[in-house]
Image (cartoon, helix red, strand yellow):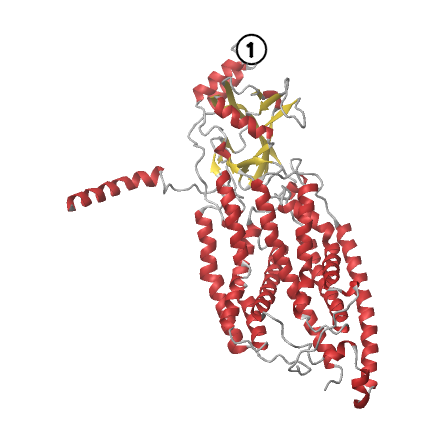
Amino acid sequence: MAPTRFLSALLLLASLPAITEGGLFKKKHRRQKAGTKHAEHDAIHVVVNKVGPFNNPTETYRYYSLPFCDKHADEDEHKAALEEDMPMGAEGADDQLMTASQRRIKADRIGAEKHKMRLGESIAGDRRETSPYELSFHDDIEWRLLCKSTLGTKELTKFKEAIHNNYFFEMFIEDLPMWGYIGDFEDEDAILGEMEGSHTYLFPHLHFKVGTNKNQVVSVTVTTERDRRVDITNVNKPTTVQFSYSVEWFEDAELTWKMRMSRYADSRFLPGSFEIHWLSIINSFVLVLLLTAFLTIILMRVLKNDFSRYMELDDESLEEEESGWKLIHGDVFRFPEFPVLFCASVGTGVQLIVATFFLLGLALTNLISTTRRGSILAALVILYCLTCSIGSFVSTRLYFQMNGKAWVRCVLFTAGLFPVPVAIVFMWVNTIALAHGSTSALPFTTIFTIAALYSLIAFPLTVLGGIAAKNYSSHDFNAPTRTTKVAREIPTEVPWYRSRFFQMIISGFLPFSAIYIELHYIFASMWGHQIYTLFGILFFAFILLIIVTSFISVALLYFQLAREDHRWWWSTFINAGMTGLFIYAYSFFYYFHRSGMSGVLQSSFYFGYMSIVSFAFFLMLGSAGFHFSLLFVKHIYSRVKCD
């Protein structure tokens, strides 16, 4: 038995080098550092990323899920292809052969080998791999054979289905993205699809155009040539395809390396509707200004009349004349039902507001690269983990002020209120992505990294925040009036315009109208191919949203108290958070009327993660509205005489 175990151990040790070099633990390639100053003829790496339907930006697959070339043709194959396409004696053939012999083709680059990626890139669904393209700095290539491949029925069917689904591909040179279409089709019916006489074409030739400035790569584009397209309509007939490429270098003196991403907003491949929209933000600002001024004037006049009436009454006539919001002074500070859930919601909302302000601040100061793929997502994950102590501190302090005893339960609720729904949605959409073989499914290493961040940073900080609130924060609520032992009966007959449902609609619609126009551009960036760079406008719009929500929450709270309804805690939080529900409703409108998205995979990602975004806005705005309303209630009841 012992010799057998010893032999097995030796075999395992002997197999480790093979596993490491070409198997499970194969070393990943390091990226070519962006901004490198190159010498003449330095190797430039083309990194391939993914393919997928243009209208479904989340439905992406590995570049080599389609039968592209993963090895470069050698020099003999290249010369043979030149001789075949341009026989000897034809004008220019000898010159091309001489050029081909002088510029040696190494054919040593292997495709389909994984690249190291950042956390944000993995979250965004990138799966970068090597490619066999041979580019060298400042060396133009008129035409070069990449590989010559005979495609059978299986390979042709893959290409044809991809072309009919409007697949695009994505490549990178030094973190600068390039896009192009795989092929095109002609004479097809929009409803019936492929008909007799229609054709499907594959684009096997790519033309790389690379701009440089001070020996640095500052711009890249890739185009396909329709003149070199190959007809693959008949998938039952094996077709020989020559995949090839050409390279053009030029001096782009007007574009510096630091501004290299600025041109992507004007890229022809991207939709052309992405423009500076100051008009929308001015419109929102004017709306907010008028609305807040209107509400302020009304509330100040009404409250002034109320204060005057209450102050003029003596003690004997007070009870007879007492009406409206002063009548419930003994119940207005009666704590809400489900205090643990309420406090956890308020604390999580404050945490998300702080994390959002930090994120927008970092984006405005360029401390994080807003144009780098996935950097916003990675920063958001890290900022959420680092701000967990804030949310826990706020929720636990409020819970103690409500005379709560089970503070540990409050801390645990705060720790899981937002991450648990995110994890549920993630497990669902990740399972769908795995079933489809999409790169949108996060790899195990990324999942492990995020889980480690939560377990080792977020959760301990949440516990520390709760302990700090328990030991160092004030546990006095400081209510200006005393709460009676028996709750006052709430009037049941109220006009329809003062009903809870109508208030929820108003409180959600008005703030939503202030951000409606800006929301379209944000959706086009989140669920499209546009790059959002106007974070100053976004920062301004977020502040406006919080201001409008808070003012409307206070106004509706006054009307609720005036009808002698003292259950304002949850109603204020829900009213303020209703804008999140309107955002989710708008996501349905955008999906069906403003985008071309379709399919189970894209729909799962879109509606799943939009529910999380809407839930985050519900918590943030609900928390903001509650805090402003609490200040308002304490202020008005501290100004009048109450027994």
Image quarter hosting the N terminus: top left
Q: Residues within 10 Å of mark 1 (few under 14, many from 20)?
A: few
Residue depicted at 25% across the width and 40% down the height: 14
Residue 416 drawn at (x, y percent): 52, 61
Q: Which is nearer the eye, 28 or 600?
A: 600
Looking at the image, which residue sits at the far top? Answer: 89
Kindly identify which residue carries mark 1: 90
**Amino acid at dot 1:** Ala
Residue depicted at 56% across the width and 41% down the height: 601
In this rendering, is residue 246 above or below 267? above
Quick check: 425 left or right of 534?
A: left
Residue 171 drawn at (x, y percent): 54, 36
Residue depicted at 82% across the width and 69% down the height: 298
Q: Which is nearer the eye, 235 or 41?
A: 235
Residue 577 drawn at (x, y percent): 67, 61
Quick check: 252 left or right of 21?
A: right
Q: Which is nearer the eye, 390 or 171?
A: 390
